[in-house]
Image (cartoon, helix red, strand yellow):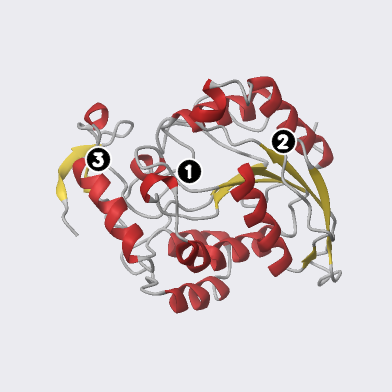
Amino acid sequence: MTVKPALPHPVTGAAYPSPVPPGTHWPDDPATARTPVAEQAEDVVSLAVSASDLHQLTARQSVCRACPRLVAWREQVAGERRRAFADQPYWGRPVPGWGSDAPKVLIVGLAPAAHGGNRTGRIFTGDRSGDWLFAALHEVGLAATPTSTSAGDGQGLPQARVVAAVRCAPPDNKPLPSERDACFPWLVREVELCRPSVRSVVALGMYGWNAALRAFAEAGYSVPRPRPKFGHGAETVLAPRTAGPPEHPGQEVLLVGSYHPSQQNTFTGKLTHGMLEAVLDRAKTYAGLE
């Protein structure tokens, strides 16, 4: 790993190298220098399953090195940096789930953007897709502010949580099937830990839809047959196969699909602000939030 000289964080002004080492007080960094690191896919399984809460899980997610191609790419991007952000440090690590520790609404996307989450350390933050998502979340009352530009910027999701199916920025935004599968246990455990509170799920794009169906099935929910097909506004109810322990009662979860707020979809009008807001509002209403 080639570490670039330290540069000031755009919010705090503290200097960090790129990539950012864990335990150096980057805003909202859940990890420390002692956080165990997954070096291969088998480690992801054991570290995910043994995580006792979301803080421990996200700390372990944020230092994962199980996929050599993704590690090399995310760190290369962090070292080279885009000209527009040449004066900023890049996170350059996996981007963990972020938001409420007891979310009513869970949002599942594909992966961090190379110069978005891979730069800021927060999912859907610092890129055009995130601009659309957080503006819509704020419009329906799920986000504290309409913008999400940097970790530590005051944004908050008091009733929602955003996660990615793949936690590292992939080349060309296309993770390999092996990388998707290696990362999958992180998502399953996050779903399990959110189970006591979550009531609705918004899947961004077909990739997010399929990842959500797989993760909830693995976490103990029944997926209808035939398998529900993705579409904007598509809905399906996922019922728990067992009631669960008294402290974690199982309840049905509504899965709603949305076109991904990628530039390809937003520039062409395939996805409008109103369409995205309608899906998020549907999820919010089903979750019992007013």
- Looking at the image, is mark 3 or mark 2 nearer the viewer? 2
Residue 139 to residue 42: above or below: above
The image quarter containing residue 159 is top right
Residue 123 seen in the current view: yes
Disc sitting over residue 123 in the figure: 1
Kindly state the secondary structure of the residue where label 1 is placed.
loop
Of label 3 and label 2, which has the lower sequence position?
3
Q: Tell me the kind of residue under disc 3.
A: Pro
Quadrant position of the C terminus in the picture: top right
Cα–Cα span, label 3 and label 1: 16 Å
Kindly state the secondary structure of the residue where label 2 is placed.
loop
Name the side, left or right, on which 251 lies relative to 82: right
Looking at the picture, how far across and down is residue 148, in whole percent? Answer: 48, 30
Q: Tell me the kind of residue under disc 2.
A: His
Camera-side residue of 155 and 278: 278
* Residue on which disc 3 sits: 89
* Residue on which disc 2 sits: 232
Residue, x 64% and y 35% (percent of image)? 259
The image quarter containing residue 179 is bottom left
Cα–Cα span, label 2 and label 1: 22 Å
Residue 100 seen in the current view: no
Disc sitting over residue 239 in the figure: none
Within 10 Å of disc 3 (Cα), the crowding (few <14, some 14-19, many 20+) is many
Residue 84 to residue 115: above or below: above
